[in-house]
Image: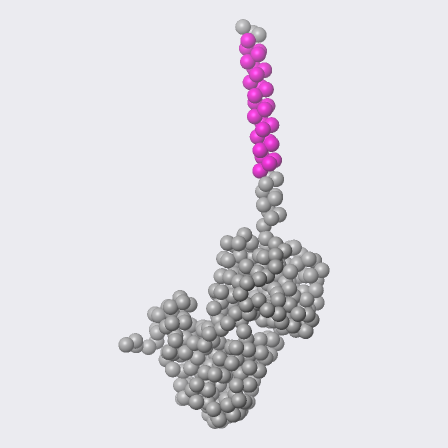
């Protein structure tokens, strides 16, 4: 009887030992799998100029979600309009060994050395919406900014500006897109004998500088037929200043980005147009490109071309913008779900 009990105990201990060892093997295997998963996880660093401009918040949210669906995590940083802060953020991404860095730059000419450091660390760099000059970036993705300027100008021509006078209130001169937009705008104005009465810029895209200019140049402004604004945020300040002078709705005002307040002004009659840039499409495409680059894949598909940034020829994914007026507001903005009908027509009584 004792021998039987002893045999049972020995067998039990052997079974228990095997179970423990098996459990250890499974645990070790699970840990190894988790480590592999961590190593395979793609990480994208994304540095924004700031979130003062309404559309950047939308770009951020769509990009992050799209990247997540493609298997990548996004570390978003806000530079608050400070170039040195943006440089530090890029250096932080380098230390974190992210796979790709996506940059909405503050100054198109200030990041070449920092981007060089990223490349030396084997990290790909994408210029998002704003071209980064004289830097070894791997991709530029944006809208056709020259077309933006052309659409702004054409809207003025369609509203009878030919032979008239226009004031240009642009965005930050450090933003490469600003010159692209303005050069295209001026070409159309020249072709239609429109005089550029004056031009000014809002450093750092600080829209309040636009209203300051309008207030301090009342006589000049009153003698103009239109004001070309760098974006809708600038246009909001311009229209407010014009309203004080009882000129809102009398002087033509243009903008871009299709901000909600701009769309409201268009249906109210104090701004004649904006340029809708489908940021959902841009952000999705950028996320796809970032993940593809992280995996060593070629960038292909819609709108892929080449642009030179002063350093080299590089791939350029260029999407088309759309002019938005009172006539196509419902079709372009509301039907697409960019803004709701209730929001756009909030301040006016609909028929």
Residue drawn at the location 54% of the way across and 60% of the way down: 287
> Main SS type for the magenta part?
helix
Name the quarter where the C terminus is drawn. Answer: bottom left
Q: Is residue 2 above or below residue 20?
A: above
Residue 86: where, in percent of width, then height? 62, 66
Count of marks, rendered view: 0
Outermost residue, top direction? 1
Asked if the magenta segment contains residue 22, the reply would be yes
Which region is colored magenta? Answer: 4-30
Residue 343 place in picture, x, y as percent: 37, 70
Q: Residue at x 61, y 43 (%)?
A: 35
- Say which residue appears at 52% left-offset and 92% top-offset: 193
Q: Is residue 290 above or below residue 324?
A: above
**Would residue 173 appear left or right of 326 to someone viewing this image?**
right
Q: Residue furthest left?
A: 351
| Residue positioned 44% across, 79% down in the render | 273
Query: Which of the 4 image quadrants contains residue 328?
Result: bottom left
Q: Is residue 70 magenta?
A: no
* Image height of 33 relative to 5, above or below: below
Question: Is residue 149 among what the camera can see?
Answer: yes
């Amino acid at each position: 009887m004792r021998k039987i009990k002893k045999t049972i105990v020995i067998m039990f201990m052997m079974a228990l030992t095997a179970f423990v060892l098996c459990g250890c093997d499974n645990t070790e295997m699970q840990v190894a799998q988790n480590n592999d998963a961590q190593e395979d996880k793609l990480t994208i660093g994304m540095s924004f100029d700031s979130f003062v401009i309404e559309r950047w918040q939308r770009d951020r949210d769509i990009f992050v979600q799209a990247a997540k669906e493609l298997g990548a995590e996004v570390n978003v940083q806000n530079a608050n309009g400070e170039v040195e802060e943006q440089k530090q953020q890029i250096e932080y991404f380098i230390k974190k060994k992210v796979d790709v860095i996506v940059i909405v730059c503050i100054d198109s000419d200030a990041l070449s050395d920092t981007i060089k450091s990223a490349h030396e660390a084997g990290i790909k760099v994408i210029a998002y919406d704003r071209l980064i000059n004289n830097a070894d970036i791997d991709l530029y993705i944006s809208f056709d900014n020259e077309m933006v300027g052309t659409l702004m100008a054409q809207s003025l021509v369609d509203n009878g500006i030919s032979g008239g006078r226009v004031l240009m209130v642009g965005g930050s001169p450090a933003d490469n897109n600003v010159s692209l937009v303005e050069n295209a705008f001026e070409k159309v104005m020249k072709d239609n004998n429109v005089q550029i009465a004056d031009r000014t810029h809002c450093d750092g895209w600080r829209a309040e500088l636009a209203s300051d200019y309008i207030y301090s140049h009342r006589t000049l402004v009153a003698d103009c037929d239109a004001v070309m604004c760098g974006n809708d945020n600038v246009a909001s300040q311009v229209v407010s200043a014009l309203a004080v002078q009882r000129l809102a709705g009398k002087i033509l005002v243009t903008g871009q980005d299709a901000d909600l307040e701009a769309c409201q002004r268009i249906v109210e009659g104090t701004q004649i147009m904006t340029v809708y840039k489908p940021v959902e499409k841009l952000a999705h495409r950028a996320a796809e490109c970032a993940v593809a680059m992280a995996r060593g894949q070629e960038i292909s598909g819609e709108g892929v071309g080449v642009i030179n940034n002063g350093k080299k020829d590089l791939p350029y994914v260029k999407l088309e913008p759309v002019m938005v007026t009172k006539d196509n507001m419902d079709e372009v903005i509301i039907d697409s779900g960019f803004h709701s009908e209730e929001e756009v027509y909030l301040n006016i009584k609909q028929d």
